[in-house]
Image (cartoon, grey):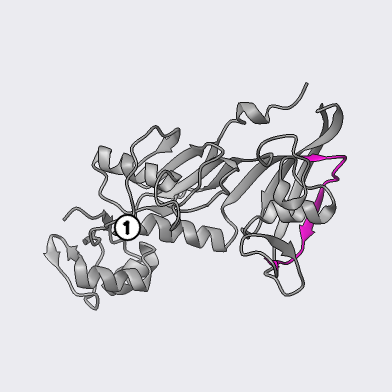
Amino acid sequence: MNGFQLQQMVTDIEDGWRVSHFCTTRLGISRKMLVSIKNHGDITRNGQHVNVHDVLHAGDRVHVFFPEETPAPDMVATEGELDILFEDDWLLVVNKPPGMASIPSRLHPEHSLSNYVLGYYRKQGIPYAIHIVNRLDRDTSGLVLFAKHGLAHHRMSLMQRSNELERHYLAYAPGNVPVQTIDQPIGQTDHSFMERMVRPDGQRAITHILNSRLVRAFDQEISLLDIRLETGRTHQIRVHLAFLGHPLIGDTMYQGNPLLPRQALHSASATFLHPATGEQVRFEAPLPEDLRLEG
């Protein structure tokens, strides 16, 4: 089997648990994933196949063989360079350049970051599908997380839902933008499939401006903002800053001043508990040259 494998020893506390309860509670495997393992993978106890209803005892070694993963049939593997910030058996952390989509689309099936990651997987013999954790707009640069396999993706998704994945962005907006929390719902505009706006019937969206520092650039004062997302709506930071009357520099979709050829937004860091070890990890993506505006 070429799928992901996971081994774990049963402790005294877990003595008498059924295999299914051990897998969902101790190993963090979703019930949907467990069904897939039953049908296309395997679970052994001390080297022997077991049923999910079988009982475990302290000292037993459980070995879970996850089904093989295959990318979507229409997913194209693109060869090229990746700026890899971190990699292990569970995660791949990549610094995305501006001007590159995070995922392919029907009109642009190649050359997205996900296509390049799949090309890297093929070259390295990594036998998994693409599991992107956080997407960035095409013209937003910075840190993007990929889960290496389905279990890692499931655990990262749970962290996102419980707001345990802390993401920080750096942004430039005109004028003096005060530190504040923006709690305004976001929905699609009536005239555009892509554009979003603050509207009462939208989804709740919360953006925290944690720090604001005035700098001088383009012969004017602008704010360098440290922003933390609590939710992850499409164009959330861009829409919220436009709502405040301080649209991102370069963000012409939301009436930002076209002083830059793209919106001045960068995914700077992510902090969370590693899905395998439970230890806190922090990853950072350096600010690209086109956003070093001070001076």
Q: Left or right of 212: which side holds 56?
A: left
Task: Pinpoint residue 59: horizontal percent, then vertical percent.
Answer: 23, 60
- In the depicted structure, whether residue 104 falls above or below residue 288: below
Residue receiving disc 1: 74
Instruction: Please give the range of residues in magenta.
Output: 172-189
Task: Point out the residue furthest to the top here.
Answer: 295
- In the depicted structure, whether residue 287 falls above or below residue 33: above
Residue 2 in view here: yes
Task: Point out the residue furthest to the left here.
Answer: 48
The residue lying at 42 percent from left, 61 percent from top is: 154
Q: Secondary structure at mark 1?
A: loop
Is 188 part of what is drawn in magenta? yes
Task: Point out the residue furthest to the bottom here.
Answer: 53
Q: Quadrant of residue 16?
A: bottom left
Is 289 part of what is drawn in magenta? no
Quarter containing the C terminus: top right
Q: Quadrant of residue 284?
A: top right
Which one is in front, 251 or 266? 251
